[in-house]
Amino acid sequence: MKAVVPVMLVATMAAGVQAGEWPQILGPDRNGVAAADERLAEAWPADGPRVVWRRKVGSGYAGVAVADGHAILFHRVGGEEVVESLDTASGKTLWQAPHPTTFSPQVGGGDGPLCVPLVHDGRVIVFGAQGVLRCLDATTGAERWRRDTHREFGAQEGYFGAGSTPVVAAENVIVNVGGSRQGAGVVAFALDTGATVWAATSEPASYSAPVVTAVGGTPHVLMVTRYACLLLDPQTGAIRWQFPFGQRGPTVNAAAPVIAPAGQLLVTAAYGIGSVSAAFDATTFKKRWEGTDALATQYCTPIVLDGHAYCIDGRDDVPPTSLACVALDSGRVIWREANFGYGTLLTADGKLLATKTDGELVLMTATPAGSTVIASARPLTGTVRALPALASGRLYVRDDTTLVCLDIGRTSHLDEGTHRPDAD
């Protein structure tokens, strides 16, 4: 086994990203960590954070992306999947780009899109529930190109529809399409034109979002598919290494892979799959620990801070769950907070923010010594499964029917005169 070269996470949105933005799933670096300039309030009012605006939305579990004063919403309205650009100050619609859909899920009742939009270098890239990949102009919403990936590559829609958010690397849009029978499990499309650049693997699709890493100074894509974790070259599609991760049956891989600053990988899933922690370089990987005892989460991507992983352990549909702190190097559970409730996590300004599926927001400090709640609120009454976005002190979170923008910054980011609680 060769010595493992340190791995650095690459900000996939480097072209045009400004501090304080949330231009893709799980934030600037796809790890749930907000920009370094985010500053959060030390307390919330008794009735919760100030509502900047709220508006009705269609169906779907796709969270918004925020960049350059635009909040990009992806939802289903009637028989169309609609990409909608909203003014971050008011919630008013700036442009819309609809596309027809007939999607109906195999499991559950959600018929809208799952993937968070990706804003990159003046483009908005969305991946719909039926596998329609679209690239739009971020300023106007005009369509630059479109590919019907499921039809073209013979992919199945899966239990809930397509749900692996694409990533941009080496000027390619890389998608876990899942075209297993055509050797098109993963496909790269040219960012400028949408042309097929390469197709690789026979892996079915997962619901996990791939991430970009630089290994030895060269960008690579780290991806969890339906049954494997793999590292690939974004220019050629060459698979550098892979190991089994996942199992057949009614299971899903949904949490994104996480890379610690020291070059350690953590992947996790529920359904008896558990977690794997490994060190790796461009050609090899070495497992450090694995199993279900420390962590086995359904879709909450762990937050890694100072050598520890913080995550909501368990399943949304099969309680109980717990908030856990796990030592990344050994897999030792440092502490657990039982019956925490399920949801997702992000971190900013030295704090952890949990967005629970029942609509509760919990702001806390979390260290290996334990967690302390700073504030909590319930701004939404419906079920929250969409990932939130945090940009310039504003939190964007949606349930089944409503998107709300909350001011949770240390100082107000909007003049009171522009406060518009209702955008509709």
Image (cartoon, grey):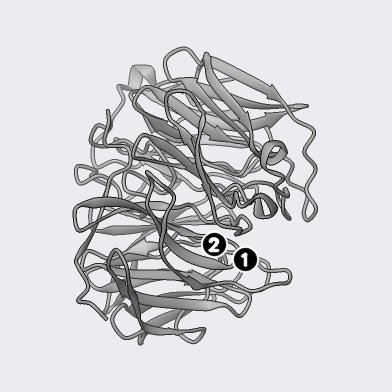
Tell us which disc is closer to us: 1 or 2. 2
Image position of 360 with respect to 405: above or below: below
Residue that label 2 marks: 299
Cβ–Cβ below 8 Å for labels 1 and 2? Answer: yes
Question: What's the residue at 27%, 31% (across, down)?
Answer: 15
Foreground pick, 239 / 327: 239
**Measured from the top left, where is residue 218 in percent x and y?**
24, 51
Is residue 42 left or right of 195 when viewed as pictured? Answer: left
- Determine whether 240 is above or below 295 in the image: above
Q: Is residue 57 visible?
A: no
Up/down of 23 relative to 303, above or below: above
Camera-side residue of 211 and 198: 198
> Which quarter shows the N terminus?
bottom left
Q: Rate crowding at label 1 as few (under 14), some (14 to 19) or many (20 or more) other CA atoms within 10 Å.
A: some
Q: Which residue is pictured at 21% across the width and 69% down the height?
A: 306
Q: Residue at x 78, y 48 (%)?
A: 105
* Residue on which the image places disc 1: 316
Tell me the SS state at disc 2.
Answer: loop
Residue 156 percent across, percent down from the top left = 73, 50
Residue 217 position, x and y percent, is: 19, 53
